[in-house]
Each structure stands twice: as structure tokens, then as C-alpha cells.
Image: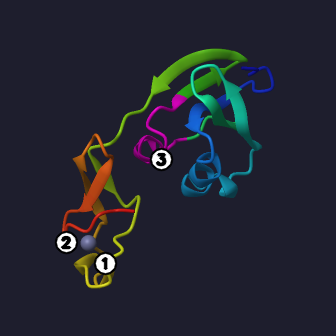
Amino acid sequence: MNIDAIQNGIVIDHIPAGAGMELYKHLGLDALDCSVAIIKNAHSNKDGKKDIIKIDAEIDLNFDLIGYLAPNAKINIIRDGILAEKRAVSLPKTLTNVIKCKNPRCITNGEQELDQIFRLTDPEERIYRCIYCETKAN
Ligand code: ZN
């Protein structure tokens, strides 16, 4: 892919087609001052179609969140116009304050200070459950 446009920044590649916008929102990229581009439905020999996010600055990213929404994503860090670092993400074992429990009677919905913690209970099916009430995420 063409990374010429970025001198110093991050390219999140191999996001499943359709998940780019969701990732953008969850990562809070709308709050950034630098330019951010989402490329939807880019052609990929490997995946058929994919989304790509380009961020024109080297920022701290929540890798758990990326791993959760796009476990096959590749993160390319570009410095001085060249690919300086390539990182893969994986499905996180636990998610802390990434998603919220949907169970209205869950203790996390009553106590605001409590962290929202989910544990990966089925890696094959990508199922996460709330550690307090066992409610399935999604
Ligand atoms: Zn819960």
C-alpha cells in the first residue's frame, strides 16, 4: 500500500472491511488534531476487502481495543517516511474498560467506580464474558 503520504505516523492495516469506522470511534481518533484517514473497502489479496486507518502522528493506541475489534490488524509505524516498526495484535485475554456490560442488574452498572472487566472465555468463537455476572458481550 501507499504510505508515502505519511512522514511520521501510524497505519493500521488489515482491519476487517466495515470495522474501520467502529475502530475509529472506539479509539477516540475523532478527538485528534492531526489528520486521520479511513480507507474503506480497500483491495487486499489476502482478505479480499479490508479497511485501513492512517494517522498522521505517532500516538498511543489501545492495542487491546484493536485486538478485540480487528484481531488480524497489522500496525505499521512510520518514521521519517519509512516503515520503522511493524506490530501485530492478538485477541486480548481480558478487556478492561473497553466494552460495557449490558446486564442492567450487573454490579458494574450500579457502581460507577468499578472497572468493566471482560474475560475471553472462548477464543475460537471470540466470546467475552463479564467477570462479575458472566453476561456475554455482543
Ligand atoms: Zn456484568
Is 72 inside the magenta-drawn segment?
Answer: yes
Please report whichever mark, 3 or 2, sits nearer to the chain's N-terminal start.
Answer: 3
The reply to whether discs 3 and 1 touch (Cβ–Cβ < 8 Å) is: no
> Alpha carbon of mark 1 to alpha carbon of mark 2: how far?
8 Å
- Name the residue: 57% across, 50% down: 23
User: Which secondary structure lies at badge 3?
Assistant: helix
From the top left corner, tell me how far across and down residue 44 is, in percent: 65, 24
- At label 3, the amino acid type is Leu
Frontmost residue, 47 versus 107:
47
**Whether residue 5 is situated above or below residue 28 in the rendered picture:** above
How far apart in space, not on screen, are marks 3 and 2 (Cα)? 22 Å
Q: Which residues are magenta?
A: 60-74
Mark 1 residue type: Asn
Judged left or right of residue 44, residue 106 is: left
> Which tag, 1 or 2, sits closer to the chain's start?
1
Q: Which mark is residue 69?
A: 3
**Front residue of 24 and 115:** 24
Residue bearing the label numbered 1 = 103
**Is residue 11 visible to the viewer in this orientation of the structure?**
no
User: Is residue 59 visible to the viewer in this orientation of the structure?
Assistant: yes
Which residue is at 20% across, 63% downward?
A: 131
Which residue corresponds to the image point at 25% horizontal and 60% vertical from the top-left?
129
Q: Residues within 10 Å of mark 1 (few under 14, many from 20)?
A: some
